[in-house]
Amino acid sequence: MIKRFLVTLSIALFIIFGCGENKQNPENQTNKSESGDNKGDLENFAESMKNLSESFNEGKKVNPVDFRDLKSLLPEQIGTLKRTNASGEKSSAMGINISKADADYREEQGNKRIDIEITDLGSVTGLSAFAAYGWYMTEIDKETDDGYEKTFTYKGNKGYEKYNNKYQNGDISVLVAKRFVVEINGDNVSMDEMKAALDMIDIGKLEGMKDFGIEK
């Protein structure tokens, strides 16, 4: 999930900031094609990403919370589902630093599954983070015969939920304090069971970490 976020964010920012520049300066495309300096382009893009992440944080450098602290927020059990695996990591790419912790929950007998992931967006808080979580910038309320998707507010934080009634699977995402993302994915469970999992995470404690690692 964390690698997918970095890829999504990179593509979104490249489209927003990179393509616009090329359209305004068509000569740049010709010069780059003639030079064939792909390595230089990648280095320039990485530097641009680093500068953008700093500008979106008002020039402040943000170090992510230790993934072990995020991991401590993951519950041991959700109803009848026991935690079968828990892990964490810190990733850095193109000047972007992110940490995350996740856990899997399964029934001993049965096919119910819930996964929880908590991510500290670290140096990509603010507008750049919203580019990767498009639902934050809009209001969604959609329903079909198979299920629904909508945005909502959870303890003062913007969230998004999607559920398929036919296959009994769904997702919940909540952006906490505009820095942390709590994501819950479930199979063969009800939305109520996934929301119960969300309620077991100490959102208040997570909000209390919002200023951690900020270097002025």
Image: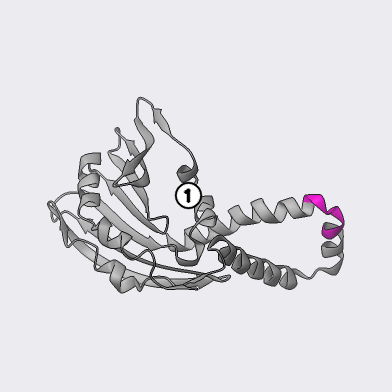
Query: How many numbered badges does the structure rendering display?
Result: 1
Q: Give the crowd class for mark 1: few <14, some 14-19, many >=20 residues within 10 Å.
A: some
Q: Is residue 188 above or below residue 183?
A: above
Q: Is residue 96 above or below residue 117?
A: below
The image quarter in which residue 29 lies: bottom right
Image quadrant in which the N terminus is located:
bottom left
Q: What residue lies at 70% left-to-right and 56% top-to-bottom?
A: 18
The image quarter in which residue 14 lies: bottom right
Q: Is residue 208 visible?
A: yes
Coordinates of residue 24 in the picture (x, y in percent): 81, 50
Mark 1 element type:
loop
Coordinates of residue 106 in the picture (x, y in percent): 20, 55
- Of all residues shown, which one is farthest toward the top? 145
From the viewer's perspective, tell me whether residue 31 is left or right of residue 166.
right
Coordinates of residue 189 in the picture (x, y in percent): 22, 43
Q: Is residue 190 visible?
A: no
From the viewer's perspective, tell me whether residue 133 is left or right of residue 105.
right
Magenta stretch, main secondary structure class: helix
Q: What residue lies at 83% left-to-right and 62% top-to-bottom?
A: 33
Q: What residue lies at 27% left-to-right and 38% top-to-bottom?
A: 168
- Of all residues shown, which one is farthest toward the front? 216
The magenta stretch spans residue 24: yes
The image quarter in which residue 191 lies: top left
Q: What amino acid is labelled 1 in the image?
A: Tyr
- Indicate how the structure is coloured in the image: one colour
Identify the magenta region.
Answer: 23-28
From the viewer's perspective, tell me whether residue 69 is left or right of residue 137.
left
From the viewer's perspective, tell me whether residue 203 is left or right of residue 94.
left
Q: Which residue is mark 1?
A: 133
The magenta stretch spans residue 38: no
Q: Is residue 167 above or below residue 114?
A: above
